[in-house]
């Protein structure tokens, strides 16, 4: 029956609060680590999906390769500044043609078909 008094004194002094705080801290840490693992898995899934996409052929003028002809001329219309204020910031714009150079970026790869190797021996 003496152990009962020691337990009673332990809880009265605040030992139960310490046990509860330790438990809460452990559960919070476990939850944070689990959320980090879930976020890392989601980030990895997005990166894998992005790695399977073909590179977008974008010109230096930020227009797609489809907007350029075989000679490299861009056929997209852009806003060209026509008037500036005292701080040399454009005030008015009008439509004009893009004056970019020929596209120099990664060429999209065509689909390649290769048969599976069935006889490895």
Image (cartoon, helix red, strand yellow):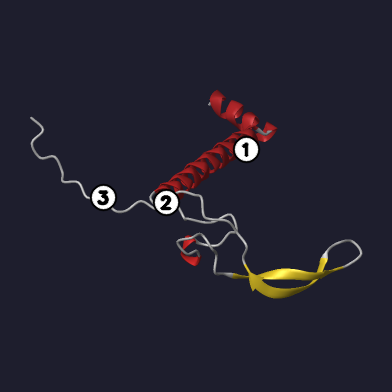
Q: Disc 2 on helix, strand or loop? A: loop
Q: In this view of the protein, which residue sits in the foreground, 16 or 37?
A: 37
Residue at far top of view? 2
Q: Disc 3 on helix, strand or loop? A: loop
Left or right for 110, reference 84? left
| Picture coordinates of residue 99, whole percent (x, y) | 62, 62
The C terminus, quarter of image: top left
Q: CA distance from mark 1 to mark 3?
A: 60 Å
The image's mark for residue 112 is 3
Disc 3 vs disc 2: which is toward the camera?
2
Measuring 71% from the left and 69% from the top, which residue is drawn there? 80
Residue at far front of view? 71
Badge 2 density bin: few <14, some 14–19, many ≥20, Cα 10 Å: few
Q: Disc 1 on helix, strand or loop? A: helix
Q: In this view of the protein, which residue sits in the foreground, 98 or 90?
A: 98
| Picture coordinates of residue 92, whole percent (x, y) | 79, 74
Badge 3 density bin: few <14, some 14–19, many ≥20, Cα 10 Å: few
Badge 1 density bin: few <14, some 14–19, many ≥20, Cα 10 Å: few
Asked if the residues shown at circle 1 and circle 3 are in contact, with their CB atoms under 8 angstroms apart, the answer is no
- Choose the circle earlier in sequence order: 2 or 1: 1
Disc 1 vs disc 3: which is toward the camera?
3
Badge 1 is on which residue? 21
Measuring 58% from the left and 40% from the top, which residue is drawn there? 24
Measuring 56% from the left and 38% from the top, which residue is drawn there? 29
Q: CA distance from mark 3 to mark 2?
A: 15 Å
Please determine whether, in this image, residue 73 is positioned above or below residue 109. below
- Choose the circle earlier in sequence order: 1 or 3: 1
Badge 2 is on which residue? 107
- Choose the circle earlier in sequence order: 3 or 2: 2
| Picture coordinates of residue 32, whole percent (x, y) | 55, 42
Q: CA distance from mark 2 to mark 1?
A: 60 Å
């Amino acid at each position: 029956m003496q152990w009962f008094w020691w337990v009673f004194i332990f809880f009265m002094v605040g030992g139960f609060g310490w046990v509860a705080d330790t438990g809460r801290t452990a559960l919070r840490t476990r939850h944070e680590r689990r959320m980090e693992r879930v976020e890392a898995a989601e980030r990895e899934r997005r990166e894998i999906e992005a790695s399977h996409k073909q590179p977008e052929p974008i010109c230096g003028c930020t227009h797609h390769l489809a907007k350029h002809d075989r000679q490299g001329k861009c056929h997209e219309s852009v806003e060209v500044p026509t008037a500036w204020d005292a701080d040399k910031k454009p005030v008015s714009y009008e439509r004009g043609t893009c004056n970019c150079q020929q596209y120099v970026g990664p060429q999209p790869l065509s689909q390649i078909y290769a048969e599976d190797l069935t006889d490895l021996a």
